[in-house]
Image: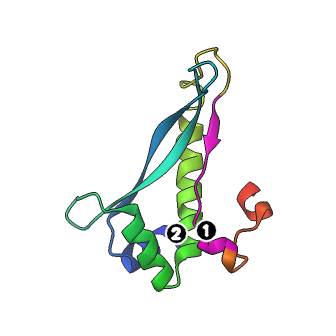
Amino acid sequence: MTEADLLETLKLNELLVYFQPIYSMRTGDVIGLEALLRPIGPVGEMVSPGIVFDRADQDGVLDDLERAARELSLAAFAAQRGTVRGEDDAPLILFLNFSAALLDVDQLHPDRIRE
């Protein structure tokens, strides 16, 4: 399923990625970024990700939404890779979320994610 097909199925206009900094409890330095998917609805409003992921699960497209979220997150992270670094100039770690429901049905394969 293409991203356009997925957006149409979920009645969304766009999927955006925002990054939440992850701090080291020991040093207080930023060590990574958590990628957060923010769906945009038909009239430009931000839609709760929980609602969208539940709808995707009900419509049988959760795996497609998860894949799109990972691809968008990786692309956005790569685009700013040279501009965002940790406090000690170390490369940042990207933290990706996934739906636990994918574990229950054995759809989350490490090789697919790594790919």
Q: Which one is earlier in the sequence, the residue at label 2 or at label 1?
A: 2
Measured as percent of width and height from the top left, residue 21 is found at 50, 33
**Picture quarter containing residue 12?**
bottom left
- In this picture, is 29 found above or below 71? above
Is residue 103 or residue 79 the one in the foreground?
103
Q: Residues within 10 Å of mark 1 (few under 14, many from 20)?
A: few
Taking 92 as reference, is 68 left or right?
A: left
Discs 2/1, front: 1
Q: Which residue is drawn at 32% across and 75% down?
A: 11
Measure how far apart labels 2 and 1 are at the Cα level: 13 Å
Residue assigned mark 1: 100
Q: Where is residue 69 in the image (x, y as percent from the top left)?
A: 53, 59
Would you place residue 85 above or below residue 77 in this image? above
- Quadrant containing the C terminus in the rendered view: bottom right
Which quadrant of the structure image shows residue 81?
top right
Residue 14 magenta:
no
State the extent of the magenta-drawn residues as a range: 92-103
* Residue linked to disc 2: 65
Give the percent coordinates (x, y) of residue 94.
62, 41
Residue 45 image label: none
Relative depth, front residue between 107 and 68 = 107
Three-letter code, disc 1: Ala
Q: What residue type is labelled 2?
A: Leu
* x 28%, y 65%: residue: 41
Query: With 113 as the anchor, is 16 left or right in this view?
Result: left
Could you say where residue 32 lies in the image, as x and y percent from the top left?
60, 33
Q: Residue at x 67, y 26 (%)?
A: 91
Looking at this view, name the residue that lies furthest to the top: 88
